[in-house]
Amino acid sequence: MGNSSYINRHKDGKTDYAVVVDHATVRFNMASERIDNLKEYFVKLVKRELMFKEFLALKDVSLKVRKGEAWGIVGTNGSGKSTLLKLICGILKPYQGTVTVHGAIAPLIELGAGFDGELTARENIYLNGAVLGYDEKYMGRHFDEIVGFAELQDFLDMPIKNYSSGMAARLGFAIATVVEPDILICDEVLAVGDYAFQQKCERKMKQMRERGATLLYVSHSIESVKEVCGHALWLDRGIARMCGAADEVCDAYIKSLKG
């Protein structure tokens, strides 16, 4: 069994830190044998014959982020970047260690994850807002702001299933950033959409940063990490390889890729 694992969340607090990850380990159980159908899976599950192998997505990772700082998280696919962000958001819980968060979070991890493809964009604005914890009155007050940022005025009554991925991403970003969070968490959101949309997102993030928001930013674009962030964490197969100034960490990461 793992150590006592929990996530402490505070809307505010007298502390210099927005996020403290303390020796966090995230464990997944993976099936160690191939099962070809659902019936066989449940039979083995009931008979306790289902075998799993342990996979540690994060291994004893620690990170302290001061309020107002911008941190980039770099690493190859499968290194644990998204797992760390989901841990901080509370989507995942640590197997060992703790996570303490001070402030409200706006997670830009899976834009439009709460959309219903059969509903129109107009309907989905309220639906996605509810998923993110905003009531109907709040979404009504900010409706025009959301539509204007997403530039979808002419497509409000079209089902989301007919949207391109870029259009859906614009709408998802506009909804997720309609509040002024203490902590902004971005996971490759700028990889979706055209150049103009990416620039618009960067300007929005810059505005939020100027208002004092803390930023945790995952991107495969090292130049973007250097541009946006002052600090960086390099993850490699779930292990924190290096932590410090963004330029130094990014340069060391790129050097490792070149062998």
Image (cartoon, rainbow, N blue to C red):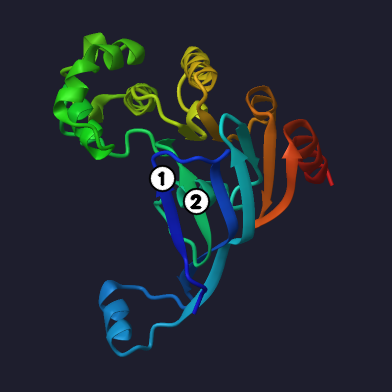
- Horizontal side of 107 relative to 168 (left or right) equals right
Identify the mark nearer the N-term, 1 or 2: 1
Using the numbered discs, state the Cα–Cα distance from disc 1 to disc 2 in whole angstroms: 8 Å
Query: How crowded is the residue under tag 1: few (<14 C-alpha within 10 Å), some, or many (20+)?
Result: few
Within-10-Å neighbours for mark 2: few <14, some 14–19, many 20+? some
Residue 158 visible to an observer of this rendering: no
Residue 10's disc number: 1
Residue 153 location (% of width, % of height): 24, 10
Q: Which residue is mark 2?
A: 100
- Up the image or down, 186 lies above or below 36; here it is above
Q: Nearer the viewer, residue 226 or 198?
A: 226
Question: Pointer 1 and pointer 2: residues touching (CB < 8 Å)?
Answer: yes
**Up/down of 43 relative to 93, above or below:** below
> Nearest the camera: 105 or 250?
105
Identify the amino acid type marked 2: Thr
Q: Position of residue 152 (x, y in %)?
A: 28, 13
Q: Is residue 167 left or right of residue 30?
A: left
The image quadrant that residue 179 belongs to is top left
Residue 225 horizontal/vertical position (percent): 65, 29
Q: Secondary structure at mark 1?
A: strand
Toward which corner of the image does residue 39 lie, by quadrant?
bottom left
- Residue at point 50%, 40% (across, down): 14
Left or right: 190, with 63 as reference point: left
